[in-house]
Amino acid sequence: MTKKIAVLPGDGIGPEVTAEAGKVLECLRREFGLDVETEQAPVGGTAYDAHRHPLPDVTLKLAREADAVLLGAVGGPRWDALPMAVRPEKGLLGLRAGLGLFANLRPAILYPQLASASSLRPEVVAGLDILIVRELTGDIYFGEPRGTRTLEKGERQAYNTMVYSEHEIARVARVAFDAARRRGRKVCSVDKANVLEATVLWREVVTHVAREYPDVELSHMYVDNAAMQLVRAPKQFDVIVTGNMFGDILSDEASMLTGSIGMLPSASLDARNKGMYEPIHGSAPDIAGKGVANPLATILSAAMMLRYTLGAAPLADRVERAVSTVLDQGLRTADIHTEGTKRVGTREMGDAVVAALAAQAK
Ligand SMILES: NC(=O)c1ccc[n+]([C@@H]2O[C@H](COP(=O)([O-])OP(=O)(O)OC[C@H]3O[C@@H](n4cnc5c(N)ncnc54)[C@H](O)[C@@H]3O)[C@@H](O)[C@H]2O)c1
Ligand SMILES: CC(C)[C@H](C(=O)O)[C@@H](O)C(=O)O
Ligand SMILES: [Mg+2]
């Protein structure tokens, strides 16, 4: 049966990078019989401009009815002064919560061709293959109470609440342990249990769940140390599981180990592996509209969609191989460009991936 993909390009470079992933899906349809149809809807600032809401009902409905969602990015300075409730980022958070996407998989893999694009020495990152499992629908992002109040003497005070319930921790921990079983059988749980009660519970529950997985080694690390270890000796990690905010920060940090934030895809999954797929980067206002953004994170996110939701792992392998081929050809967008390689724009990079894919069909 034809699978339906909701494509939500969003803001800034979002439309530029999703267009390239769209070409890749089209090529898979044409050359390899992938049975999908796509439909677009607005999200983020562009949705606010058209509908006065960053997540219009039509978009949430389309996302709910689709088999999978492919999202670009949201946000930008144009909308930064809006009230929090209608900021573009709320559109994204609304999708994650509305679709129950509690597990966010962010693989940080170094393509060997990009060893010299990493900000770390090649020997520190060679062979890097980490999976960050970020909890995505809890924590300080969604905790109540939140808001701003005025104190007696007229001073304003703002507050957010870090909250985790046992079931929220246990279900994402299981995702991490299950993933570790398919890889290096090591999970490092990252928290701030020396200070924050919510993460004392986090550590307790993860430790409890680990008993179901005697074949997986569990370790714990405070988040400040984890941030340091990620740049000191990143290959010590296999799977990292952590809360929403720590995962947000650590995954941007980990992306630089692979050469660029423009290389890191993600899958946000519910309990049945229905999912939303998006690069981990944002709308990059500083380069939006210039045709220079790296589309590979979004193309690799489409590959994750093929693997996790569409049951088409062989096609996911093909897309990842095509990405490797274009890197072998020496093609680089500005963010991963190094001496001796050829600088290309967003479209050229997407076209090259499509050509490499089509060549596999010959
Ligand atoms: N998932 C999302 O939609 C998402 C994620 C992060 C940030 N944002 C939003 O994006 C806006 C900008 O945020 P920011 O500047 O902090 O983060 P950002 O990720 O958009 O950009 C950070 C830096 O990385 C570069 N970069 C990002 N993606 C790139 C790509 N594909 N190719 C080449 N370079 C790339 C940018 O040019 C910029 O210099 C904000 O409104 C923020 O809220 C959205
Ligand atoms: C835009 C923002 C809400 C989002 C987050 O913090 O989750 C982004 O940084 C991400 O990593 O997807
Ligand atoms: Mg982020």
Image (tube, grey):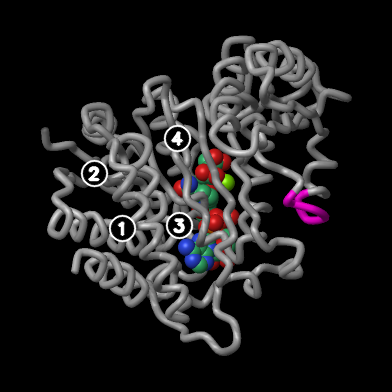
Q: CA distance from mark 2 to mark 3?
A: 21 Å
Q: Nearer the viewer's eye, disc 2 or disc 3?
A: 3
The spot of residue 171 in percent (x, y) is 55, 17
Say which amino acid is labelled 4: Ser
* Residue visible at 32% across and 34% down in the picture: 309
The spot of residue 120 in percent (x, y) is 74, 66
* Mark 4 or 1, nearer chain start: 1
* Mark 1 or 2, nearer chain start: 1
Image mark for residue 21: 1
Whether disc 3's CB lies below 8 Å from ligand 1 is answered yes
Crowd band around label 2 with a 10 angstrom C-alpha radius: few (<14), some (14–19), many (20+):
some
Whether disc 1's CB lies below 8 Å from ligand 1 is answered no
Image position of 249 with respect to 141: above or below? below
Q: In the rendered image, which residue does mark 4 sit on? A: 268
Say which amino acid is labelled 3: Ala
In magenta, the rendered stretch is 230-235
Image position of 209 with respect to 247: above or below? above
Q: Secondary structure at mark 1?
A: helix
Q: Is residue 140 visible?
A: yes
* Mark 2 or 3, nearer chain start: 2
Question: Looking at the rendering, which quadrant does residue 150 occupy?
Answer: top right
Q: Is residue 80 visible?
A: no
Image mark for residue 297: 3
* Residue visible at 68% across and 45% down in the picture: 250
Say which amino acid is labelled 1: Ala
Q: CA distance from mark 2 to mark 4?
A: 19 Å
Say which amino acid is labelled 2: Ala
Count of numbered labels shown in the rendering = 4
Q: Is residue 234 magenta?
A: yes
Q: In the rendered image, which residue does mark 2 sit on? A: 41
Q: CA distance from mark 1 to mark 3?
A: 9 Å
Find the residue positioned furthest to the bottom.
Answer: 340
